[in-house]
Image (tube, rainbow, N blue to C red):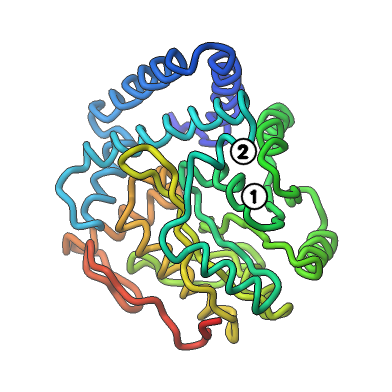
Amino acid sequence: MRVRFRVVKDVVVPIVDIGIRSLARLPFAFAKTAGWSLGLLLKSAYFIPASHLRNVSKDMAVLAGRNDPARLCFRTVDNLVRASLGFCQLSRNGAEAVADAMDFAPGSLEHCRRARDRYGAGILLVPHNAGAILAAAKFGREFPSVLLVKESKSLRRRRVIARYLDKLGPELVFVREADPKSIARALLDAFRKGKFVIGTTDLIRKRPDTVEVVVFGQRAWMPAWPARFARRRNVPLIPCYVRFTKNGRLRILCGEPYRVTDVTEATQRWVARLEENILAFPEDWPFMFEKRWARLLAAAAQAARGEPGTKRAGSVHKPGARHENSRTASQDA
């Protein structure tokens, strides 16, 4: 039986929302106990033979050069629990309390300030990390920001998510039902006013405004709008990643800002940085379980194992290896 991920989210998100709002009314110690108990229940799915959690975790472990897929899976669940508790804090105490529980990695805040001082703004590219949405509270406190939101098709789920987004601080721009011209005007207006634009761009689905890139040695299609707008307005792209530290604090990693001269190669540079961060901190990227990424990771892991009938595209990085970002058609800001 095939289960559609969107249908699952339509069912799960309202339930999680009820749980978060209920727990937010209780002492935080009780909320933590309940959250970690639910996490244990989710972890048990790993032990189901041929489960999706198990298969994807094994593939990611191969690519990251690790031999602990179970631990990788469990830590990913732990970080989802931490993010859920962060939303409890957001509901209970507001964005300031959430922002106080995170920090910027060394040099990251300086990268953003340099982009602001030189260009007036920039585009922050953030993948679907467990704590990505919560990080908007910290960005919003440091810089005037606009958060791009692709709202759900489900009206009920849309209302649930909007309830939390409204508390974060940055201005919200909803993009699913807006026409491209109005979105473009909103972005250009944000840049004119010196606001950073925060966008989630790790979707791999061929669309009219996507470009072909190589990620984990496999070909994929990624959104090109960040590079196009950055080139048009002469603002830099800033690749970001959000991870939980061992003590449970959120840490925001921002790479060096760079200007765009070629859309495809600038997008590939962002993808290279994304891959590097994922390999270093896979437990903070639960989007690996999304169906398209799961298929790509499976193909990449098969190629890494040297299984027959598999191949890699373009330049290839060894499993778990660190690598430099492409600089051929983009310039450091």
Residue 109, above or below 49: below
Specify the amino acid type for callout 1.
Arg
Between 206 and 13, the residue placed more toward the observer is 13
Residue 293 horizontal/vertical position (percent): 42, 52
Between 119 and 73, the residue placed more toward the observer is 119
Residue named by callout 1: 141
Query: Where, by quadrant of the figure, is residue 315 drawn?
Result: bottom left
User: Mark 2 or mark 1: which comes first in sequence?
Assistant: 2
Question: In this view of the protein, can residue 290 be seen by the observer?
Answer: no
Residue named by callout 2: 96
Specify the amino acid type for callout 2.
Glu
Report, in whole angstroms, how far the alpha carbon at label 2 lies from the one at label 1: 8 Å
Residue 98 horizontal/vertical position (percent): 55, 37
Q: Total of numbered circles in the picture?
A: 2
Query: Where, by quadrant of the figure, is residue 198 drawn?
Result: bottom right
Question: In this view of the protein, can residue 82 be seen by the observer?
Answer: yes
Badge 2 density bin: few <14, some 14–19, many ≥20, Cα 10 Å: some
Residue 136, above or below 199: above
Quarter of the image that includes the C terminus: bottom right
Q: Which residue shows up at 21% across the image and 63% down it? A: 304
Query: Where, by quadrant of the figure, is residue 302 drawn?
Result: bottom left
Q: Does dot 1 land on a helix, a strand or a loop?
A: helix
Quarter of the image that includes the N terminus: top left
Q: Does dot 2 land on a helix, a strand or a loop?
A: helix
Which disc number belongs to residue 250? none
Callouts 2 and 1 close, C-beta under 8 Å? yes
Badge 1 density bin: few <14, some 14–19, many ≥20, Cα 10 Å: some
Residue 332 horizontal/vertical position (percent): 51, 82
Residue 172 horizontal/vertical position (percent): 74, 48
